[in-house]
């Protein structure tokens, strides 16, 4: 019943708001509000948001941030607070570049679905049809801590493209996996989880990953994974283009996302925000751990992580989200059909994500009826996700509203601005 209610609500919303969203989709682009009155947004409540973000920086919850709100294709709020680099005292700016980590997944999913629209594959095709190394997958059955050796059992089914898009493939996430045994297996195999400055390619990494055991049978559980990294390589195989070039040619250039990519030019590198963490209450640059924070502007520049490798700005990412609110078109270019957008934003995992107010589509979290009732996270069908370095986004197709807040921190900081920002944005809609 829940499934059909959600579909009905989505269709009704599309009909009611088609004049604002789908009908104008080819031309609706992100633009400044200008000096006109704020249509559909309370100026007083935007000021509340601004004060809350000022307090977030003043109380040392984060060293700096950039926040952006778009309503009906107009930027109604875009402010930078605090510092981009504490040691040098460099001020934050609205055009600063952030490592968006898992916000890369939505862009990779979009590339996959653009190829799907061209009839290149079916969502329920086994991935081994395109990457043979994934044939005959095995599930972890036993593990020996002494030497990290393990035993496996055959999986009853293969991993499909849909499984990879929905984190139901059974793959793990190495160093950030919740399972210690999988962490050790991935580390021993030399799997790159996020990105690297070393001379590694995604084809090398994914072919190694394909030989490792799965958490579980594909399609039976939601396990956050490197599935979108696999699909970055899949895009290369299916399109015949390097993944970074495909994104640049097919998405970033036509959308005008001029500051989004896997690697930064020298000029863009000057705008990269430092990752900070707290040491004895003071902000310090985050050190090199299993990844190098300088990744986007240094190193071999050969690794294109579809799950975590992109950097971007708030305005660039807003253009990408507006494309979805427009029903798949932006700036005069159609990237996806409205029907494909509906598929992407439909619950693809049943009850596997739990009953916490969110469903999961094709690499997007989606607010369901329970989430609407909980309050503060948007209308039915609002889609969202975040990134490892404290970046978050949400986009509401009913009110045609986008919210993005970007920071670059790791570890506990006491930061509560993410939930406050989202709750207060929806409270400002009139």
Image (cartoon, grey):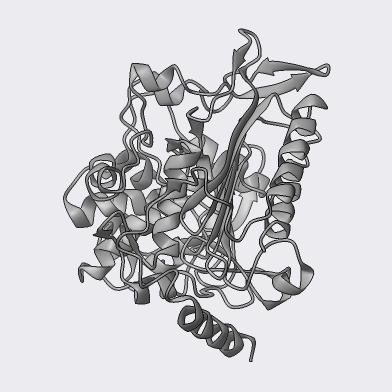
* Image mark count: 0
Figure check: 78 above or below 396: above
Asked whether 132 or 198 is in front, the reply is: 198
Please tell me which residue is depicted at 28% across the width and 62% down the height of the picture. Answer: 114
Q: Picture coordinates of residue 128 (x, y %)?
A: 30, 63
Say which quarter of the image contains residue 330: bottom left
Q: Residue furthest front?
A: 36
Quadrant holding the C terminus: bottom right
Q: Picture coordinates of residue 290 (x, y %)?
A: 55, 28
Quadrant holding the N terminus: bottom right
Say which quarter of the image contains residue 305: top left
Asked whether 194 or 76 is in front, the reply is: 76
Please tell me which residue is depicted at 63% across the width and 31% down the height of the picture. Answer: 65
The answer to whether 226 appears left or right of 230 in the picture is right
Asked whether 115 or 236 is in front, the reply is: 115
Figure check: 31 above or below 358: above
The answer to whether 401 appears left or right of 162 in the picture is right
* Residue 301 seen: yes
Asked whether 338 or 188 is in front, the reply is: 338
Q: Picture coordinates of residue 265 (x, y %)?
A: 33, 22
Figure check: 245 above or below 7: above
Q: Picture coordinates of residue 211 (x, y %)?
A: 40, 51
The answer to whether 383 appears left or right of 333 in the picture is right
Q: Residue furthest left?
A: 240
The answer to whether 21 appears left or right of 117 in the picture is right
* Residue 184 seen: no
């Amino acid at each position: 019943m829940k499934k059909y209610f959600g579909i009905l609500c989505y269709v009704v919303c599309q009909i009611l708001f088609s004049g604002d969203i789908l009908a104008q989709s080819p031309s609706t682009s992100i633009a400044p509000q200008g000096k006109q009155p704020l249509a559909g947004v309370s100026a007083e409540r935007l000021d509340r948001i601004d004060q809350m973000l000022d307090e977030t920086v003043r109380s040392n919850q984060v060293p700096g941030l950039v926040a952006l709100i778009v309503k009906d294709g107009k930027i109604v709020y875009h402010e930078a607070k605090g510092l981009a680099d504490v040691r040098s005292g460099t001020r934050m700016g609205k055009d600063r570049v952030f490592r968006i980590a898992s916000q890369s997944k939505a862009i990779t999913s979009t590339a996959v679905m653009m190829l799907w629209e061209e009839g290149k594959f079916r969502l329920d095709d086994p991935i081994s049809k395109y990457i043979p190394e994934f044939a005959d997958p095995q599930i972890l059955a036993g593990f020996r801590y002494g030497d990290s050796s393990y035993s496996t059992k055959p999986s009853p089914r293969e991993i499909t493209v849909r499984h990879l898009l929905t984190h139901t493939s059974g793959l793990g996430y190495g160093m950030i996996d919740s399972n210690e045994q999988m962490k050790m297996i991935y580390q021993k195999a030399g799997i790159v989880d996020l990105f690297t400055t070393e001379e590694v390619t995604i084809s090398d990494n994914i072919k190694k990953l394909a030989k490792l055991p799965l958490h579980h049978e594909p399609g039976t559980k939601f396990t956050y994974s490197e599935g979108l990294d696999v699909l970055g390589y899949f895009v290369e195989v299916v399109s015949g283009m390097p993944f970074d070039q495909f994104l640049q040619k097919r998405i970033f250039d036509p959308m005008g996302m001029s500051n989004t990519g896997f690697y930064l030019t020298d000029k863009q590198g000057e705008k990269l925000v430092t990752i900070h963490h707290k040491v004895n209450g003071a902000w310090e640059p985050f050190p090199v751990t299993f990844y190098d924070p300088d990744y986007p502007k240094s190193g071999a520049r050969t690794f294109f992580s579809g799950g975590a490798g992109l950097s971007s700005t708030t305005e660039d990412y807003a253009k990408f989200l507006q494309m979805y609110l427009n029903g798949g078109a932006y700036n005069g270019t159609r990237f996806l059909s409205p029907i494909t957008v509906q598929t992407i934003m439909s619950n693809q995992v049943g009850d596997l994500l739990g009953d916490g107010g969110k469903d999961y589509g094709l690499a997007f979290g989606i607010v369901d009826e329970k989430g609407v009732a909980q309050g503060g996270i948007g209308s039915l069908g609002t889609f969202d996700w975040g990134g490892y370095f404290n970046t978050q986004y949400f986009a509401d197709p009913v009110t045609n509203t986008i919210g993005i807040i970007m920071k670059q921190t790791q570890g506990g900081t006491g930061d509560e601005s993410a939930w406050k920002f989202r709750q207060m944005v929806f409270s400002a809609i009139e």
